[in-house]
Image (spheres, helix red, strand yellow):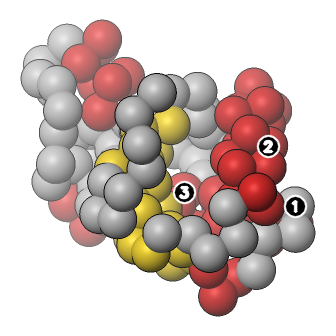
Amino acid sequence: MKPITENSLINLKNIYYQTNSYVIDSKSFFELDNLANFMKINENITIQVNGHTDSVGTYQYNIELSEKRAKSVVEYLENKGIEKKRMTYKGYGYTKPIAENQTQEGKKINRSTEILILKK
């Protein structure tokens, strides 16, 4: 593990949503519970949850979907006892791909959720 620093990005590997939805799949709960526990232990950390999509659909649709997905993560963490004032969220749609959007595997990789450490 590398040390947590301000402005570092952490890609959450196992966050899943229903297709064309911002409902978090139950397969994601373990990963999100670990994040909630991490934030409880590190009480001074504030984060921004970033949502990303693949390139299927319009720009506006993907911005809105990615923002709703990021917001749903914040709401999940809030329901686990993390103060809302410690979290923000932002949707980037398909503007920051980490893989090619021409293959199904690339699209799957681009449908991601990450956290940005704002304050340590």
Name the residue carrying label 2.
Answer: 33
Q: Which residue sits at x=48%, y=69%? A: 120
Q: Position of residue 59 (x, y in %)?
A: 20, 60
Which of the 4 image quadrants contains residue 17? top right
Q: Residues within 10 Å of mark 1 (few under 14, many from 20)?
A: some
**Would you say 103 lies left or right of 1 here?**
left
Query: Counting residues from the N terminus, which is met first, the one under dot 3 or under dot 2?
Result: 2
**Would you say 57 lies left or right of 67 here?**
left
Which disc number belongs to residue 111? none
Rounded to the nearest angstrom, the CA distance separating label 3 from label 2 is 16 Å
Q: Are marks 1 and 2 in contact (CB under 8 Å)?
A: yes
Query: Counting residues from the N terminus, which is met first, the one under dot 1 or under dot 2?
Result: 2
**Would you say 33 lies left or right of 17 here?**
right
**Kind of residue indicated by mark 3:** Arg
Q: Which residue sits at x=39%, y=34%? A: 2
Name the residue carrying label 3.
Answer: 69
Q: Position of residue 18 (x, y in %)?
A: 63, 36
Which disc number belongs to residue 80? 1
**Kind of residue indicated by mark 1:** Lys
Which structural element holds mark 1? loop
Which structural element holds mark 2? helix
Q: Which residue sits at x=69%, y=34%? A: 31
Query: Is 76 drawn above or below residue 1 in the view shown?
Result: below
**Kind of residue indicated by mark 2:** Asp
Q: Position of residue 109 (x, y in %)?
A: 33, 24
Q: Is residue 8 visible?
A: yes
Q: Residues within 10 Å of mark 3 (few under 14, many from 20)?
A: many
